[in-house]
Image: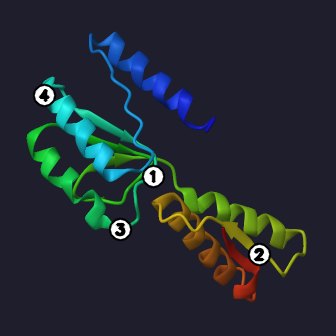
Amino acid sequence: NVYYPPIVRGIEDCLDSRGYISFLCNTDQNVSREKRYIATLRSQQVAGILFVGSRPSDPALSAHLIELRKALPVLMINDDLLAGEIASIGNREGTGIYQAVAYLRSLGHQQIGFISSSTPLTTYRHKEQGFYRAMQIASLALNESWIIRE
């Protein structure tokens, strides 16, 4: 995914400039792998942990992060699933799809569909919510058969 390398590079450069070493752990949204990485990182007495990318959309699968933040600093990058519980920064993914619908509407299109993933990640949920919001604001008919989740 071309989205993440510049983010990871920026994090690494920032940490390096402050005398920290970074470790990169790819979980592929596998919670048990994530927990093993966390245990390993904690055994190495890391100063904090940054999580980059989407989380499983079920908050119960991220509950262990609430406990983790009690032990060391935790930051979610590009996900706000646990907003209010864990510090997070990111973009507004629903805004992009909202702007796309508004643009299509400005061109006169009225029958607009949405293709997403059935993978239960927050990134897809945010985009779908943005689509529904945009369709409602634009007063466009929503045809569920035009919404595809692969």
**Are discs 1 and 4 less than 8 Å apart at CB?**
no
Q: Marks 1 and 4: which is nearer the front?
A: 4
As drawn, the label of residue 58 is 3
As drawn, the label of residue 113 is 2
Q: Marks 4 and 2: which is nearer the front?
A: 4
Residue placed at 24% from the left, 51% from the top? 86
Height in image: 21 above or below 135?
above
Q: CA distance from mark 4 to mark 2?
A: 48 Å
| First-in-chain label (1 vs 2) | 1
Amino acid type, label 4: Ser
Q: CA distance from mark 1 to mark 4?
A: 25 Å
Label 2: element kind: loop
Residues 33 and 96: in front is: 33
Residues 92 and 54: in front is: 54
Image position, residue 26 (x, y; %)? 42, 36
Height in image: 104 above or below 66?
below
**Are discs 3 and 2 less than 8 Å apart at CB?**
no
Residue placed at 38% from the left, 19% from the top? 14
As drawn, the label of residue 54 is 1
